[in-house]
Amino acid sequence: MNVNPFIPNKDANTVIVDGRISSEILKNLKGLNLKIIPTIKCTEVSEPISYHPDIVIHPVNHKTLIVAPNVFDYYEEKLYGTGIRIIRGQTKLGKDYPDDIAYNVGRIGNLAIHNFKYTDEKLKYYLKKENLEFININQGYTKCSMAIVDDKSIITADYPIYKKLSDLGFDVLLIQSGYIELKGYPYGFIGGVNGNPSKDTIMFSGRLNEHPDCEKIFKFLKKHNKKVIWLSDKKVIDVGTIITLYCQ
């Protein structure tokens, strides 16, 4: 049983994905028989990340999502009757860092990784109920920084995350930062480009060919027996994590 809510226990049948994705990505997601819940704009955060799922939502477990009050009503309505519990977070998100990181918590194994000074209090309460160990780091965009491969391995360009998790015995691939599209910022984060539709598959929003560590990434995914799905033939873009769910 996966503890990590970003890796489904049953093959996902629903995805929450950036409402601005290209028609190519949309078509390929539909081709995987996934129901698509497009995100709504969170007007209070900065424009480039205003549609990113991992900014406004944190899946505490496979059946429970904590959602920022800014956009709560929309997701409550969208997920009504799906068997997914939606809980309203306490922290209203704001424009600038750290006012936009309250829900962007990284997860691996039985760990929650964040700058807990800024984590939403209600989210912390529910994470504690899951008996998770809290690993505090300075990086606030923790989920953005972690491409979750499986329950014991991730890819990151963030050295402190790499160091901390490697020391704890996880398999972490450290890559160069950059080479990921995110309009309005110099570059996006590796954790924002992917999602896991099943235990054995990982999907990316675009191609990684322009990334200098592309070969290393492919080898790492192969080592972890991951079948890769490319949702687009264009350059990979940061879509703020594709959140996969199994809905009733």
Image (cartoon, rainbow, N blue to C red):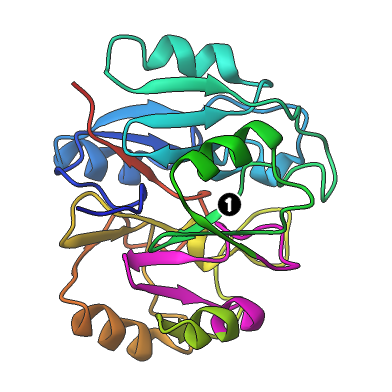
Is 58 magenta? The answer is no
Q: Quadrant of residue 80?
A: top left
Q: Quadrant of residue 17?
A: top left
Report the residue at 77% width, 41% height from top. 46
Residue 40, given in percent of the width and then of the height, sits at 55, 24
How busy is the neighbourhood of tag 1: few (under 14 within 10 Å), some, or many (20 plus)?
many
Residue 128, given in percent of the width and then of the height, sits at 54, 44
Residue 165, given in percent of the width and then of the height, sits at 51, 78
Report the residue at 52% width, 43% height from top. 127
Q: What amino acid type should be assigned to the residue bearing mark 1? A: Val
Question: As rendered, which of 180 and 34 lies closer to the eye?
Answer: 34
63 relative to 120 in the view: left or right: left
Quarter containing the C terminus:
top left
234 relative to 2 in the view: left or right: right
Report the residue at 33% width, 23% height from top. 84
Query: Is residue 144 shown above or below 243?
Result: below
Query: Is residue 122 shown above or below 81?
Result: below
Magenta segment boundaries in residue numbering: 136-162
Question: As rendered, which of 60 and 67 lies closer to the eye?
Answer: 60
Q: Which residue is mark 1?
A: 105
Asked whether the viewer can see residue 235, the reply is: no
33 relative to 240 in the view: left or right: left
The number of numbered discs placed on residues in the rendered structure image is 1
Q: Quadrant of residue 164?
A: bottom right
